[in-house]
Amino acid sequence: MPRFAANLSLLFNELPYLDRFQAAAQAGFSAVEVLFPYDIAAKETHRALLANGLELALINAPPPNYTGGEPGYAAVPDCTARFQSDIRRVMRYAEVLRPGLIHVMAGYAEGSEALDCFVRNLQWAADFAPHQRFTIEPLNPVSQPGYFLNDYGLAAEVLVQVNRPNLGLQYDSFHAQMIHGDALSIWCRYRDRIVHAQIGAAPDRSEPGRGDINFPALFDAMDHSGYAGWVSAEYTPSTSRTEASLHWMRQ
Ligand SMILES: O=C(O)[C@@H](O)C(=O)CO
Ligand SMILES: [Mg+2]
């Protein structure tokens, strides 16, 4: 069975932010991820992790698009100064929080100029923090219209061009299913590049067990491929309390 983590930006959302850590630990998770931990001082999140014996699997680099900002600037030409200041900021948080991975978001852009910009910026980030591991994640165009990184083939091409050992692919079953229509085959096809996984049903992004994805087959494929990274539950529970949506983890 894969090692499951809880995404505290979507799970346990019925609780105040700092209370979600204890709820995740009590539900049996030993790792969590937080997309945008920038609303409070890093030491407060750190304290909540320590108090509950939780590992921090991943954070996103700012800015906080869940509160209405842009979803990153890495592929946006002419925004390199902003991109670099965001990476410096996330590294200040990372010094305290020690996340296993940092997800760098591409932003709204298109075309070859954006691709060149994305590659250059990712190389800069990977070289700026060579001991930190980074990821990129394709997001589907229904949820994120205009987002540059909207295809797994494109992500694989970017990774080849960036060519840095501390940059890998973040797989998300929800986005993979929405983009390519078959989350399982995308896992198998891009497995060698995947360093982090997230799971959610499609098309409604609720818990595994609903919708079009065969999760038992996906978990088997993860196990058989020797994947040892975290598989983070990143979905909007269909139940009012997150705990009631966790049956997929216990089966
Ligand atoms: O899938 C998602 O939406 C997230 O993993 C993310 O990082 C976008 O903010
Ligand atoms: Mg995701």
Image (cartoon, rainbow, N blue to C red):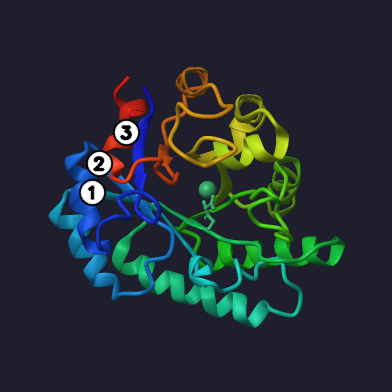
Q: Nearer the viewer, mark 3 or mark 1?
A: 3
Query: In the rendering, at what x and y percent does residue 232 appear?
Result: 41, 41
Please state if 3 lies on the left or on the right of 91 as rendered: left
Does the CB distance between marks 2 and 1 fall below 8 Å?
Answer: yes
Pick the residue in front: 239 or 166.
Answer: 239
* Residue occupying the point 29% across, 55% down: 14
Please state if 70 lies on the left or on the right of 63 as rendered: right
Spatial CA span between label 2 and label 1 = 5 Å
Pick the residue in front: 165 or 98.
Answer: 98
In the image, farthest residue toward the front: 240
Query: Residue 30: which numbered mark, if any?
Result: 2
List the residue tagged with mark 3. 246
Query: In the rendering, at what x and y percent does residue 242 appear?
Result: 30, 43
Does mark 2's beta carbon lie closer than 8 Å to ligand 2? no
Query: In the rendering, at what x and y percent does residue 152 appear?
Result: 70, 41
Does mark 1's beta carbon lie closer than 8 Å to ligand 1? no
* Element at label 1: loop
Does the CB distance between marks 2 and 3 fall below 8 Å?
Answer: no
Query: In the rendering, at what x and y percent does residue 81 appear?
Result: 64, 82
Q: Which badge, 2 or 1, is on the more N-terminal residue?
A: 2
* Element at label 2: loop
* Residue occupying the point 65% across, 57% down: 144
Does the CB distance between marks 3 and 1 fall below 8 Å?
Answer: no
Q: Is residue 184 above or below residue 203?
A: above
List the residue tagged with mark 1. 54
Q: Residues within 10 Å of mark 1 (few under 14, many from 20)?
A: many
User: What kind of residue is marked 1?
Assistant: Leu
Q: Residues within 10 Å of mark 2 (few under 14, many from 20)?
A: many
Q: Nearer the viewer, mark 2 or mark 3?
A: 3
Q: Which badge, 2 or 3, is on the more N-terminal residue?
A: 2
In the image, farthest residue toward the right: 112
